[in-house]
Image (cartoon, helix red, strand yellow):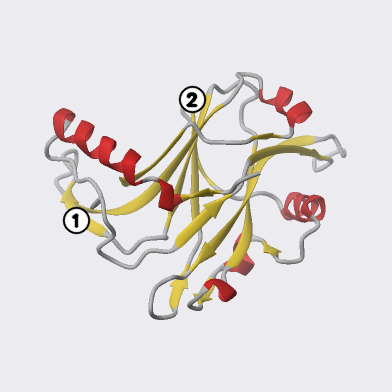
Amino acid sequence: MRAITHRTTIVCCTLMAALAAVQCPAYPIPDPVATRWEFACDIGELRIATLPTGEDGEREAYWYFTYTVTNETDKDLQYAPSFVMYDSEGDLRQSGAPAEATRGILALLDDPLVEDELSIGGTLLQGEANAKSGVVIWPVASAAVDRITIFVGNISGEAVIETDPATNEPVVLRKTLAVSYETPGEVIQLLAVGAISEPDDLLWIMR
């Protein structure tokens, strides 16, 4: 299955920029062409698995996907993975799962090149030969969600400082890749399919 790459989002980003300009002229939008350093990030299929990680060995469900990040700039840079999931139930969560779940999913993947979130961070050397692959995992919070959006952070150096209207304090907004999936409403049904092959929306935002 073809991997999802942020480099296919220029058209989506342009449409997003036009819409944002009409709806909220003051809200910052990313530059349509990168002006700061940027990593290539190829995102795989969103999958679901159940593992015997419950207190009494009962099976629990987890979302996960693999990705590859490549430093195509002209210098070595630090990489700190950041993935946040937001679903149609209003749940917003940073990625992360119990150690036994991570071990279980790595065993399912059976790929020695795929690293967990802690291991993959650090210096990302230049070039495709030094690309790193990782896995991102979340416990399934609700068995019935209609849409999932994943915010992929720390893959661009573009940022702006804005004033929070609620607190009047400065806040930093960073260029972030938003990857959205329509889900069937009963996520356990995905176990029969194995994955949602393609996101239905893929664009850059400031977050």
- Residue nearer the viewer, 77 or 164: 77
Residue 191, horizontal then vertical, whole percent: 76, 30
**Dot 1 alpha-carbon crowd within 10 angstroms: few under 14, some 14 to 19, many 20 or more:** few
Q: Is residue 57 left or right of residue 63?
A: right
**Dot 2 alpha-carbon crowd within 10 angstroms: few under 14, some 14 to 19, many 20 or more:** some
Please tell me which residue is depicted at 38% across the width and 45% down the height of the picture: 9
> From what the image shows, is residue 187 above or below residue 76?
above
Task: Name which residue type carries label 2.
Answer: Ser
- The quadrant holding residue 187 is top right
Residue on which the image places disc 2:
88
Residue 19, horizontal then vertical, whole percent: 22, 31
> From what the image shows, is residue 6 above or below residue 112?
above
Residue 149, horizontal then vertical, whole percent: 47, 36
Q: Report helix, strand or loop for mark 1.
A: strand
Task: Name which residue type carries label 1.
Answer: Ile
Residue on which the image places disc 1:
161
